[in-house]
Image (tube, rainbow, N blue to C red):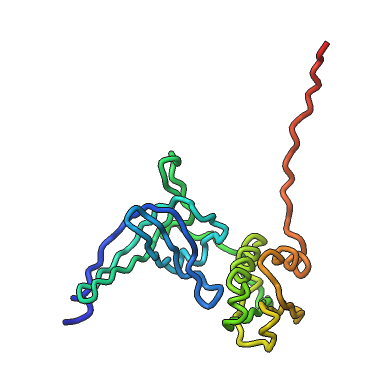
């Protein structure tokens, strides 16, 4: 029996609380872990969602996920692949998309210069560095790059052992500066140093009103 006859493909729509991201190679977003009334599910994200997802999504957020479900009759395995992710829950009266839908035309980006140089941040991917916080470090770097709008200029690249296992996590910035024992909480300061501080949005202060108590 061919593979196509062993698998049933259908659409699914489920709601649940976001638990965590599923990351491959320390920094590549692959999917989400979702808790529902029926249990926990791993939902693989379609490629167009992975590129746009906000890694700052807080755990516990209610999500509605729509996509494709594959059921393998022979093994009984069920795989979910999301095509659309939205905010959900009784407390949300109007569901707003967290991500652009596949039918939306992506915003055109200005043409890159032929001589445009990409900056690579090299991060050790060996198990020793990963156990010392390398996974969270990569997630924090990706989020900081996104916040600063540097996706077209800066790339995170995994490397082999940097020979500083006991001082992990280890990374090398684009100007060849090497850092050891760097943690996710230090990423903002590190990015300010190498790429300049991100733009701050000024919040207007409320007008002061003098009250006559006489």
Q: Is residue 43 above or below residue 169?
A: above
Q: Nearer the viewer, residue 9 or 26?
A: 26
Q: Position of residue 189 (x, y in %)?
A: 75, 64
- Picture quarter with the N terminus: bottom left
Q: Position of residue 22 (x, y in %)?
A: 48, 68
Q: Nearer the viewer, residue 87 or 153?
A: 87
What residue lies at 54% left-to-right and 55% top-to-bottom?
Answer: 58
Count all numbered tags in the image, as a single digit: 0
The picture quadrant where one finds residue 130 is bottom right
Which residue extends farthest right?
Answer: 214
Residue 103 visible somewhere in the drawing: no
What residue lies at 76% left-to-right and 60% top-to-bottom?
Answer: 197
Q: Position of residue 67 (x, y in %)?
A: 34, 61
Which residue extends farthest left?
Answer: 1
Q: Nearer the viewer, residue 158 or 35?
A: 35
Which residue extends farthest front?
Answer: 166
Q: Position of residue 40 (x, y in %)?
A: 38, 61
The picture quadrant where one finds residue 112 is bottom right
Left or right, 167 with reference to 61: right
What residue lies at 41% left-to-right and 45% top-to-bottom?
Answer: 89
């Amino acid at each position: 029996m061919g593979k196509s006859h062993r698998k049933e493909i259908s659409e699914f729509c489920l709601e649940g609380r976001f638990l965590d991201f599923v990351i491959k190679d320390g920094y590549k977003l692959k999917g989400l872990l979702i808790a529902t009334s029926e249990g926990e599910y791993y939902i693989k994200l379609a490629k167009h969602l992975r590129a746009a997802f906000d890694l700052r999504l807080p755990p516990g957020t209610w999500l509605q996920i729509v996509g494709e479900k594959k059921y393998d009759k022979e093994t009984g395995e069920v795989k979910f692949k999301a095509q659309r992710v939205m905010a959900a829950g009784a407390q949300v009266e109007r569901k707003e998309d967290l991500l652009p839908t596949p039918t939306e035309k992506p915003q055109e980006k200005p043409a890159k210069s032929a001589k445009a140089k990409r900056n690579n941040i090299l991060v050790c991917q060996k198990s020793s560095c990963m156990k010392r916080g390398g996974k969270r470090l990569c997630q924090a770097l990706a989020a900081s790059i996104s916040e600063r709008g540097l996706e077209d200029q800066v790339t995170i690249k995994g490397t082999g052992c940097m020979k500083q296992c006991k001082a992990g996590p280890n990374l090398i910035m684009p100007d060849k500066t090497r850092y050891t024992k760097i943690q996710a909480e230090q990423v903002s300061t590190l990015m300010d140093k190498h790429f300049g501080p991100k733009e701050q949005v000024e919040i207007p202060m409320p007008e002061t009103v003098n009250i006559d108590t006489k």
